[in-house]
Amino acid sequence: MVKIGSPPRKAAVVGWPVGHSLSPLIHATWAEREGRQVTYEAIPVAPDDASFRSAIEALIRDSYRGCNVTLPHKERALAIADEASAEARAAGAANMLTFGGRRVLADNSDIAGFAAALDERGVRPRRALILGAGGAARGVAIALKRLFGAHLIRVANRTSSRGRHLALLVDGEAIDWTEKDNALGDIDILVNTTSLGMTGQPPLDIDLSRLPRSAAVADIVYSPLETPLLAAARAKGATAIDGLSMLMHQAAFGYRAWLGSAAVVDADLRARLEGALKARNGE
Ligand code: ATR
């Protein structure tokens, strides 16, 4: 029960840039639904260790319960923490910091958020191709390996050394970036973790003709919501999972940890976020 007169619970998302984050709207939607007064704002924090540390110290002083951490601070967030979950340690990155007294706990809900977005669609992949090998790819690879028990994880990355490094982490197989079209025939999920296909970025050049129709395609890009990759997947009858699903599901963990209990990912929340994206793009 909320005590009358108790101050609103506070959390935030820190990143650089962070002005376009949809996280404040997600948390405000959940708080409104359960009639709870909360504060959740997007705080820009310059991309250096000193700025990050002082921003976190300020949040702790101001009695914030925790914060989400987005690019480019996810590795710093893990480094600064006193304790970290097994997922955050495995990913080498954290997107959640929880403040308990003076102790900072790091967690990674990108991993469980990706898994929840797949679960919601009944997708339980065992053989995957991941495009990219950055932080987002690491989270996806760990989710596929640990939460779904995937026994084939292929990684295609422009810089082959990074691709090999990620493949090694999950007992996977690195393939050349130019070979990705030929590596689709025996997989049940393709995941794009690169920024290719995002508004303002180059397109993702991939031919899905070898992909089985029973496969799923997930794209972490959510602007545009329907990337050319997802449109191509849908056109051939494959299951398309967009970046908004993963974003909503990862946010639920932070909301429950810091602000309230009713963090439900549903069509109403999606409609609200899609509306915000459209307004932003002037549609
Ligand atoms: P994040 O932590 O969000 O995953 P990142 O570490 O910068 O961000 O990773 C971005 C991914 O997109 C990388 O796999 C990157 O490939 P490189 O390792 O070769 O840099 C990939 N990427 C970005 N731009 C690309 C492009 N134009 N063509 C192919 N891959 C690209």
Image (cartoon, helix red, strand yellow):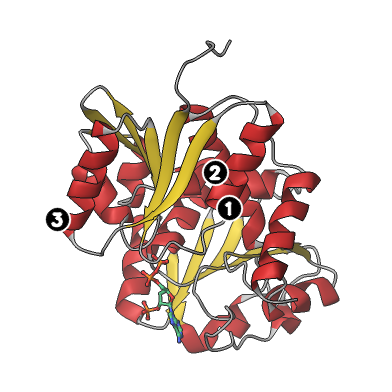
Q: Mark number for residue 168? A: none
Give the answer, above or below, for where 76 lies relative to 36: below
- The answer to which of marks 3 and 2 sits earlier in the sequence is 3
- Tell me the quarter of the image containing the N terminus: top right
Position of residue 48 relative to residue 2, above or below, is below
The percent coordinates of residue 217 (x first, y second) are 68, 66
Q: Report which quarter residue 12 is drawn in.
A: top left
Q: Is residue 38 visible to the viewer in this orientation of the structure?
A: yes
Q: Which amino acid does label 2 sit on?
A: Ala
Would you say the beta carbon of the disc 1 residue lies within 8 angstroms of ligand 1? no
At 80% from the left and 47% from the top, the residue drawn is: 267
Give the crowd class for mark 3: few <14, some 14-19, many >=20 residues within 10 Å.
few
**Where's residue 85, x and y in %?**
34, 35
Mark sitting on residue 247:
1
For the C terminus, the image quarter is bottom right
Identify the secondary structure beneath mark 1: helix
The secondary element bearing badge 2 is classed as helix
Q: Residue 251 carries which label?
A: 2
Label 2 with label 1: CB-CB less than 8 Å: yes
Amino acid on which disc 1 is placed = Leu
User: Residue 215 or 247: which is nearer the viewer?
Assistant: 247
Residue shown at 20%/44% (left/top)? 80
